[in-house]
Image: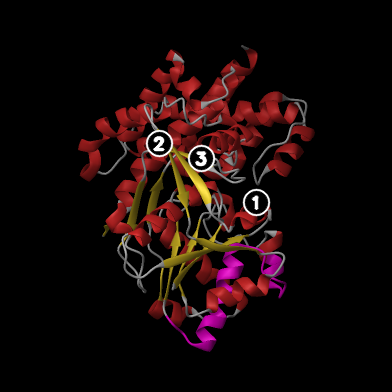
Amino acid sequence: MKRILHLGPGNFHRAHQAWYTHHANARGGEAWTITGVSLKSSTARDSLAPQDFDYTLVINSVSDTQYQRISVIDQILVGPENPQAVIDLIADPDTAIVSLTITEKGYHSDAATGHLNTQNPDIASELAGGQPLTAIGFLAFGLQIRHQTHGAPITIISCDNLSNNGATLKRLVLEFNQQAGLGLADWLAASVTFPGTMVDRITPATTDALRHEVEQKTGWADQAPVATELFSEWIIEDDFATAHPAWDQVGAQFVDDVAPFEHRKLRLLNGPHSFLAYAGLYTGHVYVHEAIADAVLRKAVEDLMLEAAATLPASIQSSTVDYCDQLIERFANPALKHELAQIAGDGSQKLPVRILSVIADRHKTGLHSPRAHDVIAYWLVFIHQRSSAHADINDPLAKRFAEIHQMSSDRREKLSAILQTLSPDSSLGQDRVIDRAETLLDA
């Protein structure tokens, strides 16, 4: 049985790649198994192990709910508990694919340069000879052993919302290889591919209410069910060094160029999602479907989509109107109960590709971006208010935000410093964004 080793077996992976693999296996042919790797917490392993790593996928449409039992994960390793076991599985010839859903911050790239952040303590520790701690470190050390022992080809697939995610992951692994002196560059070029992908399926966090619902509807006291929507999309660059499951027979699409689909999703779905998160929380909403039902916020989302659509490649311009209409319907699905607070996390990592890219592309052609600037302003308000309340901020720059809050009593100075963490680029329109944030704070 061929193996996929997946780094980050959280809810999105279990609603998306694992779901596709489960259904591909059901088509017959060679079966594939997924071994998960949690890089931080043992939560997923501890909740799934007592039920043999099966779980219920609850698929919510506006008119119907399906309860599908997914059986494709064979085990979940916890990296910090046994890093060598993870390295050994990357090196194992039965592992044909490594996939990742580790969120943007898990790649440890420098926000300003896009290169590997060698100043990050975990990366620095790995480069100094310590145990692997990060996805990049595990990949590099595991690939080194694979190269030394048998050199079998392998495919490594990023399924995160990064611009040009496959090439980005490849560059970071190569940079780690160079910094660590692993000597892998030639073998990576010959035997390892990093296909780009675009992934899309709205997946809220699991709640006790969901567990209760699943037990009531199925009779199974599933401790790790996952809720998702009926819609699902997976666009994969057709660049495999190995065999792969029959994902294309169950809805995935193999294409030559992922970029147009990636830009469409990041700018038309993820960007408006971020706006709804920050503006919705500011307005007092809790869920996405509540925020999009707010007429003022819905109009702002529609305007933001128009701004972003104008920056997309000509090859997909004709599809954007229908795509946006479909997104509004998806956002309005009350059955998902997608919390705005979940989307609001890691804004410093998300907003550069979701919003700043729109502003930059429009600036090049002399176009203003008032709604995109609004997203940044609401994010500034979110960070400022959370810092002022000494509340936790789920962001890799949380420590820096706390330092900014302590550095001055001048609010505008604080807002400016927070904005600088996102981008020092003057074309962002800093004064306009800060003016808007101050207006919101004074309201």
- Residue that numbered label 3 is attached to: 218
Q: Nearer the viewer, mark 1 or mark 2?
A: 1
Q: Amino acid at mark 1?
A: Ser
In the rendered view of the protein, which quadrant contains the C terminus?
top right
Horizontal side of 336 relative to 326 (left or right) equals right
Q: Which mark is residue 269?
A: 2
Residue 370 position within the rendered picture, expressed as x and y whole percent measured from the top left: 43, 24
- Residue that numbered label 1 is attached to: 47
Q: Is residue 125 magenta?
A: yes
| Quadrant in the picture for residue 63 | top left
Is 373 located above or below residue 442 in the figure? below
The stretch of residues the image draws in magenta is 124-152
Q: Amino acid at mark 2?
A: Leu
2 or 3: tag closer to the N-terminus: 3
Is 237 located above or below residue 333 in the figure? below
Number of other residues with Cα within 10 Å of mark 3, as a class: few under 14, some 14 to 19, many 20 or more:
few
Seen at 32% across and 67% down, the residue is: 239
Q: Secondary structure at mark 1?
A: helix
Q: Nearer the viewer, mark 2 or mark 3?
A: 3
Number of other residues with Cα within 10 Å of mark 2, as a class: few under 14, some 14 to 19, many 20 or more:
many
